[in-house]
Amino acid sequence: MSLAVEATSLYLRATNASRIKSEQQRLRQQFTVAADFAEKVKSTLGSTSAASISQPDSVSSVKVSRIFSDLRLSTKEQALLLRSSKLNGTTFPPWSSVDADHTADDELFTDPAGFLPLSSSQKQFFSAWKRPTDMWGNKFTLLGDGGSDLIQDVLSDCSVIASLCSVIAWEARSKKSLVSNIIYPQSVSKSGRYVVKLFFNGLFRKVVIDDYLPVSSTARHIHVVSTSNKGLLWPALVEKAYLKVMGGYDFPGSNAGSDLYALTTWIPEHILLHNDHIDMSRLWHRIIVSWHYQDLLLTVGTGKLSREEELSVGLISEHDYAILDLRVLDDNKRVVLIKNPWSYGHSFAIQGSLCGLQDKLPVPSGCLWMEFSQMCMRFSSLYLNWNPQLFKYKRQVHFDWNMRNGTADKSLYLCPQYALENPNSVAVNVWILLDRHMRIKNDAKTYIALYVFNDPGTRIWMRKSTIIMTKFVDSRQTLVRLEVPPKTSYTIVAAAQTDVSEINYFSLFVYCTVPVNLLPAGDGLAHRDGISGQWTELTAGGNILSATFACNPQFRLVVPKETALQLFVETSATIPVHAQIVWGGGRRVQTQRDIVLHTGEYSVGCALSKQAQMMAGEYTVVVSLYEAGIMGDFDLQIISSESCVISRLSDLSSGYYGDGF
């Protein structure tokens, strides 16, 4: 395996070094053969488990010119996407092809939404809002050279500028347009009206702006500029459109992966570099192969650093940088070219940088070469954005989620769940992207994650053994990559953690190489009957061995005919909880009776019983906490194949004691 990878690296270095087109083509073909062979060896060694699957082989696969997407949205989904058009008090309607064909008239346009808010630091330098003609006369262009020299200054949008730098470098390598072509018209607008096509809140949306830009009273800049062509307009207008969506120039910050997703729709993947489980060699192989085929955009970010740490390592705290190039040198060094988009940031005296390479490799202004291993040590996050054309098919679903009803803090039964089915006779590479819609600037911090369960597409009630469980992140997107075996179904669960009880909107996208099915997860048992209750000073009786156990809340359960049944209880208390069904004739019991069904050992937050067959009859349900005297609320659910009836029994304080021994 190591020899196969080494051969791949040798051919790649030779391809990069050659300046003869015919030789480059021959070496590229040899590189493809070597890379294919390395992948086959890796498969032979058994590295295709669900946990270790990488991206589809972007070397040997042919990118499709069209992605087949399931656009048959339900009426509810269409209404949700329309509601998601309202953001920060402004409406951003779904994109239409006529928006690109729209020709503005000659009358000067001023955005009725007004000027975008500035931060307090920006206001210190602010002079006026001016149009390009007021700043540069006729010495400006919409498109043109200079995009590779973009910088940020008095703005906190390093992630946006790093994103622009990354994608502009891609455009230069590929000779294709990816971001410079999302602004309309594609020439200077006489009216100053522009329309920008961005992807957010589930689909492409129309963002209308005027050409007013904030001008500084000093030499500092309040919008992105090119150091080599200050009259280059499109980057500043795309930046303005994106910041309008985000609420203003007082942008609180994002991450470059999310920003690139909005600008390009390239699939975002976030890798935490300080994770002990990362195989750096395998990671390098993933990115160098896809980089070579121009299927990947790369940016990196730092974590929280003290001032002393900033000065020590030469990096800026919580700051995003662009990766402009990857190389394998003659001595097998793996190196990356990193650009700092901030013009007033620290000089690049970064530990681990390769200052000696300046004579061997081109070093653009504001950039440095660094060994890949050092980059992984110095930075905390690597953002990968993948070309969606690696996949021929895409499935999507859009849903709302009332966080008041339940997140993933304890149980999962109220979390959105979907069945992912592979009906094919071959295994399928599948990528699943959960995208949280934006609502207002600085909205409550919500952490999201994705769980994949080896379950036949049925609803999951409690956490159990998962195939994949992502970490909770405060980003707007999270991604899962896996291989689904032939004729297999999994259950996908969207999980969240938040302190605010509100309705959130989400989109779930599934990218695949052959068609798969994405449907709402089915209930294993058709009926669900629930009731809520609480433990008070009088009813917090404690566990089964407690002398006051009979004081606990009790319920009458009527089973009209034989049924398969499960018992579930969830509580706000932090003490282990338990529920049991006993032979009590539907009346209150004072002492322990024969147990028909129970939720097992006391467990924190929630408890679920196994499925059992219940004969027709009347039963008594007792819900308890492990410790007596602990108060709290709970929710009791009867899950069954036949409809049952659950009702509350009077507690002991009411004077009725029911059956006893």
Image: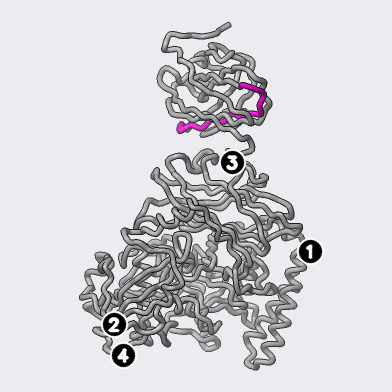
Q: Nearer the viewer, mark 4 or mark 2?
A: 2
Residue found 54% across the figure and 84% down from its top: 175
Q: Could you tell me how far apart the alpha carbons at marks 1 and 3 are, in whole angstroms?
A: 33 Å
From the viewer's side, name the closer residue of 301 and 72: 72
Q: Is residue 86 left or right of residue 133?
A: right
Residue 103 location, x and y as percent? 37, 79
Q: Nearer the viewer, mark 2 or mark 1?
A: 2
Query: For mark 4, what is the residue?
Result: 139
Q: Could you tell me how far apart the alpha carbons at marks 2 and 1 are, in whole angstroms?
A: 65 Å
Amino acid carrying label 2: it is Asp
Q: Which image quarter: residue 318? A: bottom left
In the rendered structure, does residue 527 fall within the stretch colored magenta?
Answer: no
Mark 2 neighbour class, 10 Å CA radius: few under 14, some 14 to 19, many 20 or more: few
Q: Is residue 473 above or below residue 458?
A: below
Q: Give the magenta range.
A: 560-573
Counting residues from the N terminus, which is met first, the one under dot 1 or under dot 4?
1
Mark 4 neighbour class, 10 Å CA radius: few under 14, some 14 to 19, many 20 or more: few
Mark 3 neighbour class, 10 Å CA radius: few under 14, some 14 to 19, many 20 or more: few
Q: Is residue 115 above or below residue 539?
A: below
Q: Which image quarter: residue 185? A: bottom left
Which quarter of the figure is the N terminus placed in? bottom right
Q: Nearer the viewer, mark 3 or mark 4?
A: 4
> Magenta region's main secondary structure?
strand
Q: Could you tell me how far apart the alpha carbons at marks 1 and 4 are, in whole angstroms?
A: 61 Å
Q: Could you tell me how far apart the alpha carbons at marks 3 and 4 are, in whole angstroms?
A: 62 Å
Say whether marks 2 and 1 touch (CB < 8 Å). Answer: no
Q: Is residue 367 left or right of residue 41?
A: left
From the viewer's side, name the closer residue of 347 and 155: 155
The image's mark for residue 410 is none
Query: For mark 3, what is the residue?
Result: 463
Residue 403 location, x and y as percent? 44, 44
